Amino acid sequence: MPARLLYTGQVVVDLVMALDALPRSGGDVLARSATFETGGGFNVMAAACRNGLQTVYLGRHGTGRFGDLARGAMTAEGIEIATPGSDDQDTGLSVALIEPSAERSFISYVGAEGGLSRDDLHSVAVQPDDYVFVSGYSLLHKHKVSALLSWLAELPKGAGVVFDPGPLVNSPDSAEMQAVLPMITLWTSNCEEALRFTGCEAIADALEQLSRWLNQGALIVVRDGPQGCWIRQGSNAQHVGGFPVTAIDTNGAGDAHAGVLLAGLAAGLSAETAAVRANAAAAIAVTRWGPATAPKAAEVDELIGKTLLGD
């Protein structure tokens, strides 16, 4: 069976609002635009699907307008939904505030996606070549984390565990994080998250520290914005250059990077080649409004080809 992405994180609905500036406390500003978009873990899964990786959503989804929106978006992308909808909760909501600099801020409300059971997770048989994606957000949900950790400990040998700490997991000190660290075969985060998690001030030091905490063969990928990303496996660390573009919205760019990286690795590409494709995908994503703006494989090929030709 071909490798699959099994996503255990959270799909939410984003209310995306473009602002000239964030309001002060107690203040009010007028948004230049506002749209509802499916986001959260959907961004990673959509990126993977658009680049040829079969994808299964193992998280929960709600009953209501947001749950309907999330399911419709996943179905349209060809994402398999493994779990039934919640009977008593809707899918959660995240307000994404986008400034002219393309920086984004979030305010989130947790819905049905904040829960998960062993039965949910056992609805799909994990194969040795599968990639199991774990979000740092999941470690913070009390109705989810215990079942998730138990299930991860039972994964078959050969299954990859991909971990994205996100903005809220700030150190390795929690019991939940200590349980996950030995299981991780692929770490993916942005530079700020890696530095905060390790307590380091430079990417090279963060890569070194992460390599000490993770198992010997783990691949570490740290995104560095327009500069591209850094990858390390064993003692070999290298910088993989980015693609110069004019960014208008960075929302979802890291997710596009992660999904396309996994699609490349699943297709048998080297870590460096997969990272080049992921950098190209992220570069395209930041030139588009919205959270799930990952390009398809042909668009990634086109940007890489133009760059190689010097266009």
Image (tube, rainbow, N blue to C red):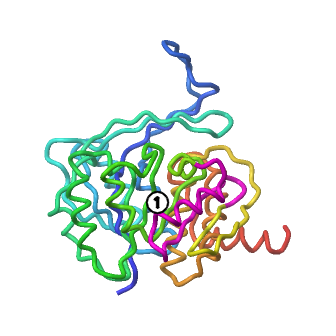
Kindly identify which residue carries mark 1. Answer: 44
Q: Pinpoint residue 241: horizontal percent, then vertical percent.
A: 73, 64
Task: Kindly give the residue lying farthest to the right in the view shown.
Answer: 310
Nearer to us in this view, 29 or 212? 212
Query: Local crowd at mark 1 within 10 Å, few (<14), some, or many (≥20)?
Result: many
Whether the magenta-drawn stretch holds residue 207 is answered as yes
Instruction: Identify the residue shown where x is 29% and y is 44%.
Output: 91
135 in relation to 278, above or below: above
Q: Pinpoint residue 167: horizontal percent, then vertical percent.
A: 48, 44
Task: Kindly give the residue lying farthest to the bottom in the view shown.
Answer: 1
Instruction: Provide the residue span drawn in magenta.
Output: 200-228
SS for dot 1: helix
Classify residue 244 as left or right of residue 296: right
Q: Pinpoint residue 181: horizontal percent, then vertical percent.
A: 39, 62
Whether the magenta-drawn stretch holds residue 60 is answered as no
Amino acid on which disc 1 is placed: Val
Instruction: Identify the residue shown where x is 29% and y is 48%.
Output: 68
Q: Total number of numbered labels? A: 1
Instruction: Identify the residue shown where x is 35% and y is 77%.
Output: 159
Identify the image quadrant of the N terminus.
bottom left
Task: Kindly give the residue lying farthest to the top in the view shown.
Answer: 26
Quadrant assignment, res 257: bottom right
Instruction: Identify the residue shown where x is 45% and y is 57%.
Output: 164
Classify residue 53 as left or right of residue 100: left
Identify the image quadrant of the C terminus.
bottom right
Quadrant assignment, res 126: bottom left
